Amino acid sequence: MLLGEKNEYVETFIYDQLGPVLEYDAKMNASLLTTLEVYLKNRGRKKETANELFIVRQTLYHRLEKIEELLGYQFMEPARRLALETAILAYHIYQSGHTHFNLEDYQL
């Protein structure tokens, strides 16, 4: 599949969906994007997410509260979740610098 060269529409989409999380991570040297990505991959299962991140559940709860504060309380609703997953995928593709990608390489 061809992503093509970076363009402002995709970059705007990524920023619209993930901007507050990316800014928080950069400013606070945090890992909310990773937390969100693993949480989405685990379909909102907290125990599995905490285990995969090697953190206690209380730490996960604090991170999820911060994510909710930044993205809104409906970030796990189906349409919003799909937008976030798509933005995370696009973000990783852009960060890798690739214009061609194999979808299996970027599974959430």
Image (cartoon, grey):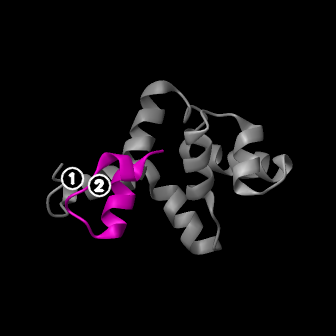
Question: x%, y% of residue 101?
Answer: 26, 55
- In the rendered image, is residue 16 in sight? no
Is residue 1 a member of the stretch shown in magenta? Answer: no
Q: Residues within 10 Å of mark 2 (few under 14, many from 20)?
A: few
Q: Is residue 92 left or right of residue 77?
A: left
Q: Amino acid at mark 2?
A: Thr
Q: Quadrant of residue 19?
A: bottom left
Question: x%, y% of residue 102?
Answer: 28, 51
Q: Which residue is mark 2?
A: 12
Q: Which residue is mark 1?
A: 9
Asked if 97 appears above or below 84 in the picture, the reply is: below
Residue range of the region highlighted in magenta in the rendering: 89-108
Question: x%, y% of residue 57?
Answer: 83, 46
Q: Amino acid at mark 1?
A: Tyr
Is residue 103 a member of the stretch shown in magenta? Answer: yes
The kind of secondary structure element at disc 2 is helix
